Image (tube, rainbow, N blue to C red):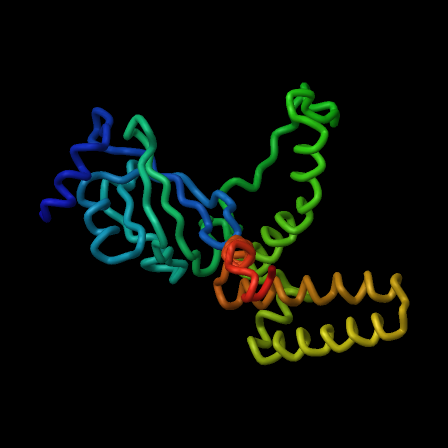
Amino acid sequence: MSAGLGELESQIRWNTDGLVPAIVQDAVSKEVLMLAYMNRESLARSIESGETWFWSRSRDELWHKGGTSGHTQRIVSMHYDCDGDTLLIRAKQKGAACHTGQYTCFFNSIPVEGDNGEPDQSVTAEEAAGSDRFRMLNELEAIIARRYAERPEGTYTTYLFEKGVDKILKKVGEESAEVIIAAKNQDNDELRSEAADLIFHLMVLLRERGLPLDDIMRELGARHNKPTTNKMR
C-alpha cells in the first residue's frame, strides 16, 4: 500500500463492516448514476486501475463495474465529503450504468405532495430567472446522455450515435449552413428553429466526444477574463 493510499484510508470513516458508500456521477452530464459500496481493497483497485471497483454486500465479494457487461466507468475524479463517510466519483460511463439497461439506477420517480409547482420563495426573482434560463440545456444534456447509453430503437439520437462521428459532423455542418441562410434571409422564426437544431447536434457531438458542456462554459469564462486583445472580450 502506498503512503498516499494509507493516508487516504485514514481520512475515511468506514462503517462497522469496513465499507463506505460511493456515489457515481456522470462526468459529462453530471447526472447521478448509481450508489454502491467500497472497502479498502476496492478503493485501492479503483485508484490503481482508473476504473470503479466495489464490494458486493449480497455476494460478499469484490466486483469490477462493467467487468462482464463491458459497461465500465473510467474515473475522472474522486472526492470524499466533509465527514469522510461518503465518496463521490465522477466517471465517464461506457454504456448503461444500471443492470436493467437504464442509463442511471435512479429512474423511478416519487411524487411529492408538497410540490405544487410554485417557485421557491427563498430564491430571488433574478436567481430563479437565471437558473431557469438554461434549464433546457441541462435537461437536453441528460436526455442525450441517456440515449448514448441506452440506444433505444427508433430514436433519432440513437440513429446519430449508431452512424458515428462522421454523420454527426455532417449534421453539424448542415445545420450551421441553415443558420447562416436563415440569418441572411432575416427570418427570425427560421433562425430560431435552425439555431435550436444546431445546438442539439452540437451537444450530440460533445457527448460523442465525451466533452462536458461545463468545459465549454469554463472555456468561455477563461476567454472573457483574458486581456482585451484576445477573443471573447
**117 w.r.t. 48: above or below:** above
Expressed as whole percent of the image width and height from the top left, the position of residue 103 reads 52, 51
Expressed as whole percent of the image width and height from the top left, the position of residue 140 reads 65, 53
Of residues 123 and 84, the one drawn nearer to the viewer in this rendering:
123
Of residues 66 and 174, the one drawn nearer to the viewer in this rendering:
174
Q: Is 199 displayed left or right of 78 in the figure?
A: right
Q: Is 158 displayed left or right of 21 in the figure?
A: right
Taking the spot 28% from the left edge, 57% from the top edge, the residue there is 50
Q: Is residue 100 visible?
A: yes
Q: Is 152 displayed left or right of 149 in the figure?
A: right
Taking the spot 74% from the left edge, 25% from the top edge, the residue there is 118
The answer to which quarter of the image holds residue 125 is top right
Q: Is 112 displayed left or right of 97 in the figure?
A: right
Expressed as whole percent of the image width and height from the top left, the position of residue 21 reads 33, 34
Of residues 98 and 136, the one drawn nearer to the viewer in this rendering:
136
Image quadrant in which the C terminus is located:
bottom right
Of residues 223 and 211, the one drawn nearer to the viewer in this rendering:
223
Taking the spot 31% from the left edge, 36% from the top edge, the residue there is 80
Taking the spot 63% from the left edge, 66% from the top edge, the residue there is 202
**What number of labels is visible?**
0
The answer to which quarter of the image holds residue 185 is bottom right
Q: Is residue 154 visible?
A: no
The answer to which quarter of the image holds residue 126 is top right
Expressed as whole percent of the image width and height from the top left, the position of residue 99 reads 45, 50
